[in-house]
Amino acid sequence: MTDSLAASYAFCRDLHRTYGRTYYLATRLLPAWKRPYVHALYGFTRYTDDIVDRLERAGAVTDRTAALHWWTARFTAALDGVPVHHPVLPAVLDTIAVFRLDRADFTAFLRSMELDLSVTEYATYDDLLTYMEGSAAAIATMMLPILGAPDLAAAREPGRQLGLAFQLTNFIRDVGEDLDRGRIYLPLKDLAEFGVTPDELRAKQATRPVRELIAFEIDRAREHYAKAAPGIPLLERSSQPCVRTAYRAYGAILDEVVRSGYDVFRRRATVPAVRKLGMVVSSLLTPAGRPVRGLPGEPH
């Protein structure tokens, strides 16, 4: 490995360690040789997402569009063999080459990031799923060849479902933060069914209808977790503790929302460090191939 490639992997690892702490913790359970490739994918997705979010906070829509188009063009050129200098690109290009990752997944991800430049709300869950196909499911299918599975085709759909479950968990936890950014990811049709207007949601009051809405979205996320769970035993034995831990850690966010009485505004739902450590130990002690038991977000 050249010095520049090693530096790129280190850069991506640092991004992962700084901004994706729950996911980074789970990644520590992977075999050492797999971790840099996961860091590279995280580095690519995080850097891309930060282009949208960082410039959004600066209030520069045209700058965000120009920056994302610039980044997409550089990435595409690099994929086509054009020499491009950037701290993230050598690692992600190497990862793509080593595992022959599908270029279409990266295209789908970038397309969803572009939606964030102009779309601030989604009418139906099907509309939101279109966004999440690129922002979440595509990332899961990028990851799958690195995690490994005797039958990649069989593991693909559960992997997609886990990506969707994680993304929806984030949307539930971050309702208030997304409102501050002018976004409502919860489908407007769902709001209407519970008698919640967008303005009422923006008021950030955990009224009974809002709590019922959040409970409904948690049930929807649980459906994705249920579809994802059978895929974990299909992975390579060495990758199962990592994914079990991620499954439990993200799912525990829903448990915290339930524990708060479905109030996503008073404080951000976080999982105590000691509980995460317990998940790590439990995942390491779980025999490979054992089915996942229980679902997160169980009503009290």
Image (cartoon, helix red, strand yellow):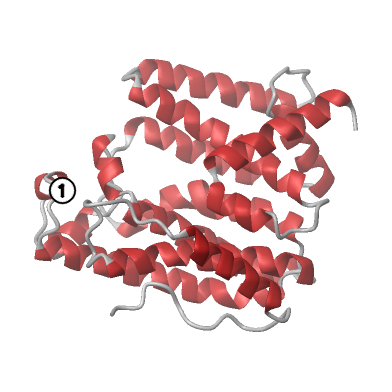
Where in the figure is residue 247, as x and y percent of width and height? 54, 66
Q: Residue at x 78, y 18 (%)?
A: 83
Identity of the residue furthest to the right in this view: 1
Check disc 1 and report its element: helix, strand or loop: loop
Where in the figure is residue 62, as x and y percent of width and height? 37, 16
Q: Residue at x 48, y 30 (%)?
A: 50
Q: Residue at x 15, y 64 (%)?
A: 193
Front residue (pair 247, 51): 247
Residue assigned mark 1:
204
Query: Does 253 appear above or below 78?
Result: below
Q: Badge 1: how crowded within 10 Å, few (<14), some, or many (20+)?
A: some
Where in the figure is residue 58, as x and y percent of width and height? 34, 19
- Which image quarter: residue 213? bottom left
Query: Does 69 appear above or below 166?
Result: above
Quadrant where the N terminus is found in the figure:
top right
Whether residue 161 appears in this view of the structure is no
Identity of the residue furthest to the front in this view: 274
Direction from residue 57 to residue 23 in the image, left or right: right
- Which image quarter: residue 80? top right
Where in the figure is residue 239, as x and y percent of width and height? 73, 65
Front residue (pair 299, 218): 299
- Which image quarter: residue 179? top left
Query: Does 290 appear above or below 94?
Result: below
Front residue (pair 121, 11): 11
Q: Residue at x 43, y 21 (%)?
A: 65
Amino acid type at circle 1 is Lys
Direction from residue 115 to residue 75 in the image, left or right: right
Whether residue 65 appears in this view of the structure is yes
Query: Does 23 appear above or below 113?
Result: below
Quadrant where the C terminus is found in the figure:
bottom left
